[in-house]
Amino acid sequence: MTTSTEPVQGVGHAIRSRFPIFEHTTYANSCSQGALSVDVRQAYEAYLEGWDAHGAEWEHWVERAEAARAAFARLVAADPDEVAVTTSVSQGVSGLVSALPLERGRNRIVISEFEFPTVGQISHAQELRGAEVVHVRPEPDGRIPLERFSGAIDERTALVCCTAISYRTGYRLDVAEVARLAHERGALCLADSYQAAGAIPLDVRALGVDFLTAGTVKYLLASAGLAFMYVRRDLHERLLPTQTGWFADEDIFRMDISDYSPASTARRFDAGTPPVPNIYAGLAGMGLVESAGVPRIEAHVLGLIERLLTGLDALGATVATPRGAGDHGPLVCVASTEPHALVEALQAERIVTSSRDANLRISLHLYNVEEDVDRILDALARHRALLA
Ligand SMILES: Cc1ncc(COP(=O)(O)O)c(C=O)c1O
């Protein structure tokens, strides 16, 4: 077992020993929660030790929050002052929509049917402010053709919300094209990239999005309670969130309660006291992802997914995830007659997966290896009756 926090360059066997769960379990559920590494455990311990040794280490803790902002910025090829540090995607997106005027004539929010409840429910909450929400539905094959977005976005659209990789089906959307369609009609575009960050390369400028958000729970290998939101630089001064907090102020330490004067950067979408313990964990998790390298992680995982898909075909399973080149990332969904029973049957064999709708979800990450895929396929063969 590795116990040091030396940087690791590799994927697969080179990094696996940093994740103790693999000593006894085949973990294939990174779409719900990344596996715990020794690095993240040590980061929590460092937080506790610092607190114990020095009491309130506020200067250091605020510096750690800035380090996390910079780490996420590197991950999505943004500048740190274009990134807000939030406690959840919900917090960032709520702040964002609170800053949209939603004026008469431009009051629509277009959302894809694959949005996580976060984005879907926050969008519908804006109906109380006069918004209209338009849903973009997928085809039966699990793809959302761009024409569907094109048909839904018009000059009444204020914001288009799309999800880079669907948590429900594993479908990978062409976010750049959706952003282009939004801009053609004068709308802004938000990409919820929670299921993509750490798994596939993300470059906010190449994608052309106005906002991109993700948290650290899944492929960023850390804990609940930390997320980020990229906000395109030229929008900072134009957007005034009414859902805010004192860490979003232009001068936090002035502690002035006589007016609202938010930071001139994306920090205006921060809110209250930063989630310090989760920031320690987030830095460790993002550090592992960064040192392995996202392009290398993606290539490694796509190789494993190919092996998985070949095995699923041999079993005659129905794969719900679109499987063309570029149509999927690290998550494969397999139709099941009883998904909960199947998850439990696999759990009993120490294989961790999850389910959504009528599908089993198998998601792979940098620490998975071919033996994991083969174990999963062998188990599915034993439980073939639970596959649709
Ligand atoms: C695509 C996606 N968006 C958002 C979330 C979570 O959002 P929040 O940070 O608000 O809990 C998840 C998973 O938890 C997700 O899979």
Image (tube, helix red, strand yellow):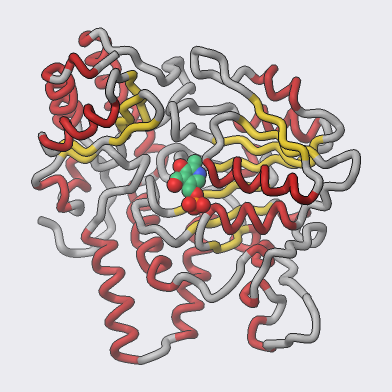
Q: Is residue 126 left or right of residue 370?
A: right
Q: Is residue 16 visible?
A: yes
User: As rendered, which of 96 and 65 lies closer to the eye?
Assistant: 96
Looking at the image, which residue is at 30% across and 70% down? 44
Q: Residue furthest right?
A: 105
Q: Residue at x 33, y 32 (%)?
A: 355
Say which quadrant the C terminus sits in.
top left
163 up-or-down from 18: above or below: above
**Of 363 and 245, which appears nearest the observer?**
245
* Camera-side residue of 257 and 262: 257
Residue lying at 27% horizontally and 31% vertically, measured from the top left? 340
- The image quarter in which residue 186 lies: top right
Q: Residue at x 29, y 79 (%)?
A: 48
**Vertically, is 384 above or below 192?**
above
- State the residue lying farthest toward the bottom: 54
User: Residue 170: horizontal and vertical position, in percent?
Assistant: 43, 28
Tell me: residue 302, above or below residue 3: above
Name which quarter of the figure residue 191 lies in: top right
**Quadrant of residue 283 in the image?**
bottom left
Where is residue 264 shown, x and y percent of the image? 75, 68
